[in-house]
Amino acid sequence: MMPDFLLRDAGSMSQSGLWALIVVIAVLFVGTLVLSVYAVVMRSVHLVREKKSTEMTERWRDPVLGAVADPSLVPTVQALVEEDDAIHFLSFVIEYARRVRGEERDILCALAQPFLPRMAERAHARSTEMRAWAVQMLGTLGLPEYAGEVVSALDDPSPLVAMVAARALAREETPQYAGEVLARLDRFDTWNPLFLASMLAAMGPEVSGALRDGLAAEDATPGKRSVMAEALRLQGDFLAGDVAAAVVSRTPDRDLLASGLKLLAAVGRPEHAPVVRRHTDSGDAVIRAQALKALGALGGEEDVPTLVDAMDDPSPWPALYAARGALNAGGREALARLITQGHPSAHLAEQVLAEEGGR
């Protein structure tokens, strides 16, 4: 039989454990209750804000559209915006500004002008998200008045803010900022090169000269020059052929060489074919593929045998580009012979001839 003092200790321990359990349950209950109340409050706040935003949108929509049609109404619309609603109004206007160009966009920018100083203050906020949002607003609605703030944002410590600034400046309507964007292109080297090239190409033909200079600059990084080459290819800039040929004849960098060959395939001339021929037997399948593609675009019937032989390439892309190149260079009959002879590359010949028939 257990001694009395052990029974008393066991009972005391059991009672202490019970109280501890009760305290834990109470804390969990209170915590759950607090979280539930917080969720309800936040939901209510969200609904109130959403309702207010809807009301403001409905109040501003017709007047703003009226001002776009009749610019004399701009002051009348601005007077409808209360001071506390200025930020909401800018968010409303920017949605329309993204969809239009020319005079309509200018009117929307004029509507926003009195409210942009608040955005200029937020461009220096501690929050990265706030700075990015402010720079986007200023870049979309505040140029050229706030060009200084947007250009400065290209050097922001946050890559996100810098990219927002670059996208705001890299527009066809604002080619005067191309130099500022191009000078800082290296800091975006972690971004997708095709995205960067597309952004630069969108600035239009007025920046093509700067892109050609950037591609020719041998002191620039190969990655930066590759982006320039891709941007020129997207623009279809035929003046870039000579620069691309010089790059292809001299660069040791694989990616830049591939970009130069792609550019030559798009905008090169027959006199550029010799620099392309040097790379058709490259040990790198990517370089061979781009060289064969470019040779098909720039070469003539004298290059058909080289292209037909390259259809035996062990790598599929060089072989396919060689077949397409042979067709482009005037080798239709040579491809047809491969089919009738049952050549191992006959399937490629059939494919490219079928592609031609489907165009």
Image (spheres, grey):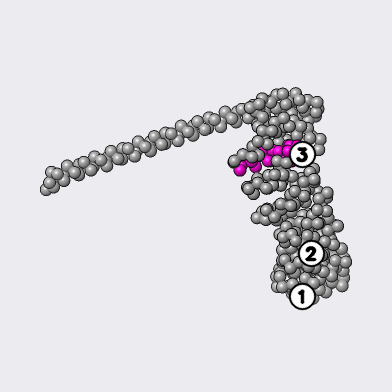
Q: Quadrant of residue 12?
A: top left
Magenta residues, as a range?
128-147
> Looking at the image, can residue 342 be seen?
no
**Residue at 69%, 33% in the rendered image:** 117
- Rounded to the nearest whole Å, what is the CA distance between mark 2 and mark 3? 36 Å
- What crowding class fits label 3: few (fewer than 14 Cα within 10 Å), some (14-19), or many (20 or more)? few
Q: What secondary structure is the stretch in magenta mostly built from?
A: helix
Residue 17's label in the rendered image is none
Under mark 3, the amino acid is Pro
Residue at position x 75%, y 52% from top?
182
Residue ID for mark 2:
247
Q: Nearer the viewer, mark 1 or mark 3?
A: 3
* Distance in Å between CA atoms under marks 1 and 2: 37 Å
Q: Report the quarter where the C terminus lies.
A: bottom right
Badge nearest the viewer, 2 or 3: 3
3D distance between C-alphas at marks 1 and 3: 64 Å
Q: Which residue is mark 1?
A: 343
Q: Residue 9 at what x, y percent from top left?
A: 19, 44
Q: Kindly tell me whether residue 274 is visible in this rendering.
A: yes
